[in-house]
Amino acid sequence: MVTVLLLVLGFFAGLLGALTGIGGGVLLTPILALHFGIPIREAIGTSLVAVITTSAASSSVHLQRHTTDIRLGMTLELATSLGAAVMAYLVGYFNRGVLEGLFAAFLLYSSIMILSKGGKVKPEDESSPAVNGDLVIPPYEPKRYPLGLGASLVAGAMSGLLGIGGGPIKVPVMFIFMSVPLMVATATSNFMIGVTAAASAMVYYRRGDILVQIAAPLAVGVFVGSLLGARLAPRIHTRVVMYLLVGVMLYLAAHLTFHLLRGGV
Amino acid sequence: MNQVREPAFDRAVGRVLRVGAFACFFIMVGGLGAGLFLSGHIPADIERVGVLLIIATPVVRVVVACFLFFREKDYRHGWISLGVFLILMMGALFGMGEH
């Protein structure tokens, strides 16, 4: 029965992730902790497996469309993977309360950010006409690498700390400061998430913080959900889905805070 | 990319990710299916293989990209990829022996 629930949870997290551009880790970690009674550190480690699955499935699609800048991604991965591995190691010394508090704050911050943008987080299609099925990307040269590397280090540390992808940090930095087209920034960020999450996941796995019997049904559900979500995305009113997601995130933030104040169940 | 588009490079790296994701999916489905008919540690062992495979997929992707960069004589990005690989390996060592 638990396995079926985890399959369904993974499916909806993958579906919402593909429809809104917000990775499944944001939802999976608190739900695993609050509704499945899994300690927050194991919940983070386990949801990292789902994050890698989503990244692998979706970035293979972006690579087919040739919208990923592999060289830029690989360079920034030096910083994301270092930040992720170091922070994942340090998490071993954090207590449950600190992690739950940080996660609740992150959920609240993400909700406010989405609401302040009027429910839009996905890049608009940059009027990219297709030529022979290929997307046309304007010529560009990434700038300000030190800034990009610094932001990537922070994004990687966030990933190692909370089991999330860190896209909301990397995409704006690449787009605004490094002069990378938004479409390329989004695809490249997605591409980097797999390696970043793998750097943290190895630390969590070695520490025994990845519960394989929980991770397996989640990953299967996420895989199917994100493939379906990618197909449905062009046909669905994403803003409605985004508000639904904000509602779920606010509920989880409140529940986590309540759980924290009560000292756990 | 940086101005130059390399479909063959994208295809090779994309193939690694696709094969890894699909293989992991089928192995995990196999593990879940085995759980319906078998007791003991076999289903969990199958699922563990799936989890390890999906964690290894991005690592293999880095190794493949590293190989392709060096083959193209793009030494700068070849060394960068090697650096990423070493950081990933360091991450694996970090968690060792902890519980």
Image: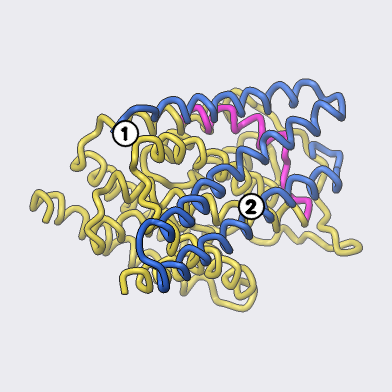
Chain colours: A yellow, B blue
- Segment colored magenta: A65-83
The residue under the point 51% across, 50% down is B49
User: Dot 2, how many residues are within 10 Å of its Cα: few (below 14), some (14-19), or many (20+)?
Assistant: many
The residue under the point 23% across, 44% down is A101
Choose between B45 and A69: the one closer to the eye. B45
For residue B47: magenta?
Answer: no
Circles 2 and 1, Cβ within 8 Å, touching? The answer is no
User: Can you give x and y, in whole percent of width and height, for residue B94 in the image?
Assistant: 41, 26
Q: CA distance from mark 2 to mark 1?
A: 28 Å
Kind of residue sitting beneath label 1: Val
For residue A72: magenta?
Answer: yes
Choose between A2 and A142: the one closer to the eye. A2
Up-down: is A251 above or below A98? below
Say which of marks 2 and 1 sits in front: 2
Mark yes or no: residue A120 visible: no
User: Dot 1, how many residues are within 10 Å of its Cα: few (below 14), some (14-19), or many (20+)?
Assistant: some
Residue B20 tag number: 2
Query: Quarter of the image containing the N terminus of chain B?
Result: top right
Q: Residue furthest bottom?
A: A235
Say which quarter of the image contains residue A33: bottom left
Kind of residue sitting beneath label 2: Gly
B22 lies left or right of A71? left
The residue under the point 72% across, 39% down is A70
Q: Which residue is mark 1?
A: A91
User: Can you give x and y, in whole percent of width and height, for residue A18 in the image?
Assistant: 55, 64
Secondary element at image label 1: helix
The residue under the point 68% across, 55% down is B18
Q: Main secondary structure of the magenta part?
A: helix
Q: Residue furthest left?
A: A262
Choose between A158 and B70: the one closer to the eye. B70
User: Can you give x and y, in whole percent of width and height, for residue A99 in the image?
Assistant: 26, 42
User: Disc 1: which chain?
Assistant: A
